[in-house]
Image (cartoon, helix red, strand yellow):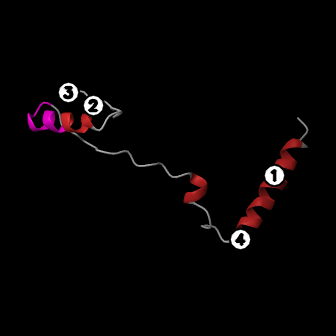
Amino acid sequence: METVLVQINNNKAYKLLEDLEDLHIIKVLKKSIEQKQKLSDKYAGKLPSDIADELQSFVTHSRKEWNNRNI
């Protein structure tokens, strides 16, 4: 068996899929795709602002050291 992803362009297609499922020809695994949440929205406000400021300062300092290195 093979699993495929299908995009529905017409509402009548849902009825056809249900009919095929009733005939045991296919099995509908997922009827809708969840919208993926942006990472910035997902993690907004999760880090206390004082720790976020320290982390940003550390990253900025590290980048300066990296750019000023002598190799």
Highlighted range, magenta:
18-25
Cα distance, mark 3 to mark 4?
51 Å
Cα distance, mark 3 to mark 1?
51 Å
Say whether disc 2 or disc 4 marks the residue closer to the N-terminus.
Answer: 2
User: Residue 59 location in percent, x, y?
Assistant: 77, 55
Q: Specify the amino acid type for callout 3.
A: Met
Say whether disc 2 or disc 1 marks the residue closer to the N-terminus.
Answer: 2
What kind of secondary structure does the magenta stretch mostly adopt?
helix
Residue 44 lies, with reference to residue 16, above or below; the image says below
Residue tagged by mark 2?
3
Residue tagged by mark 1?
62
User: Residue 46 location in percent, x, y?
Assistant: 59, 67
Disc 4 vs disc 1: which is toward the camera? 4
Mark 2 surroundings: few (<14), some (14-19) or many (≥20) residues within 10 A: few
Cα distance, mark 2 to mark 3?
7 Å
Cα distance, mark 2 to mark 1?
46 Å
Q: Of all residues shown, which one is farthest toward the top?
A: 1
Residue 4 lies, with reference to residue 40, above or below; the image says above
Q: Specify the amino acid type for callout 2.
A: Thr
Indicate the secondary structure of the residue bearing disc 2: loop
Judge whether residue 27 is colored magenta. no
Say whether disc 3 or disc 4 marks the residue closer to the N-terminus.
Answer: 3
Task: Evaluate if marks 3 and 4 touch, with contact meaning CB atoms under 8 Å apart.
Answer: no
Residue tagged by mark 3?
1
